Amino acid sequence: MPLYQPPDVNAPVLSQFSLKGKVACVTGGAKGIGVEIVRGLAEAGADVAFIYSTSKNADEVAAKIAEETGVRIQAYQSDVSSRHRIAETLNQIADEFGKGRLDIMVANSGVCANIPSLDYTERDWKHNNGVNLDGVMWTAQAAGKIFKKQGKGNLIVTASVSAILVNIPQNQVAYNASKAAVVHLAKSLAVEWTEFARVNCISPGFVQTEMLDFQPKELRDQWMNTIPGRRICQPAELKSAYVFLASDACCYMTGANIVIDGGYTLP
């Protein structure tokens, strides 16, 4: 079976971006980039379930976006680093929330730690890779089984510019290595899954989230000097790219890694 093609490739271009009637799921969807992905998919018409780990206001976030967009939004607590747990949650979402379907899966959960490489403990290393790499794999595996069963699906992975360069001056070898692995994982799945799913990545640069809020001013100033765009990205500026990848507007795109970084990786 060839890569999915929409019924009418000549449909008006804006109609191809519509996600009306689609069922989507986003991991790490309660805050940061994730909540804007949820909002973007909902604004495009999709019903969206999102998965969170420890957020205390996930239900309030879901209710607010549902009220703003007029679609169904529901929060589910789970653990992407657990193969069994995330599979159980995604099957529940597909069966109950999606009424037997899951069209779009966004593997967005991620963590980052600034630790010198010689100081890593086994626990630190496992935690970073457990979320950033294993979490994507187990999310992809569970969603992929659903996609294969229904004959069609779409996986989008949030990677990072750290997959293609080494950020300075911070020490984040686990994050960098895990994000590089995630990009190649997505490319490998894209080749393997052409009969039933598309798989693509988005690699943001510096984004104004809680992950950056905790960083000292001198570090932020140094980053700013290395960004040709001379500013930090707002999370809402990324949501349209996720809608593009989730939609029929790019059905021939699979295995791609879209870099959105204000030119940070260019010099």
Image (spheres, grey):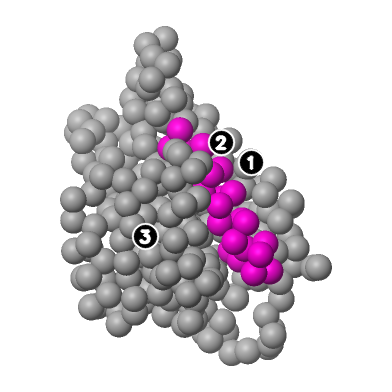
Badge 1 or badge 3: first in the primary sequence: 3
The amino acid marked with disc number 1 is His
The amino acid marked with disc number 3 is Phe
Start-end of magenta stretch: 130-154
For label 3, the crowd category at 10 Å Cα-Cα, with few meaning under 14, some 14 to 19 and many 20 or more, is many
Element assignment for label 1: helix
Residue 154 seen:
yes
Badge 2 or badge 3: first in the primary sequence: 3
* Residue positioned 37% across, 37% down in the render: 111
| Front position in the image: 217 or 26 | 26
CA gap, disc 2 to disc 3? 25 Å
Element assignment for label 2: helix
Q: Which residue is mark 2?
A: 180
The label number, if any, that marks residue 17 in the structure image: none
The amino acid marked with disc number 2 is Ala
Element assignment for label 3: strand
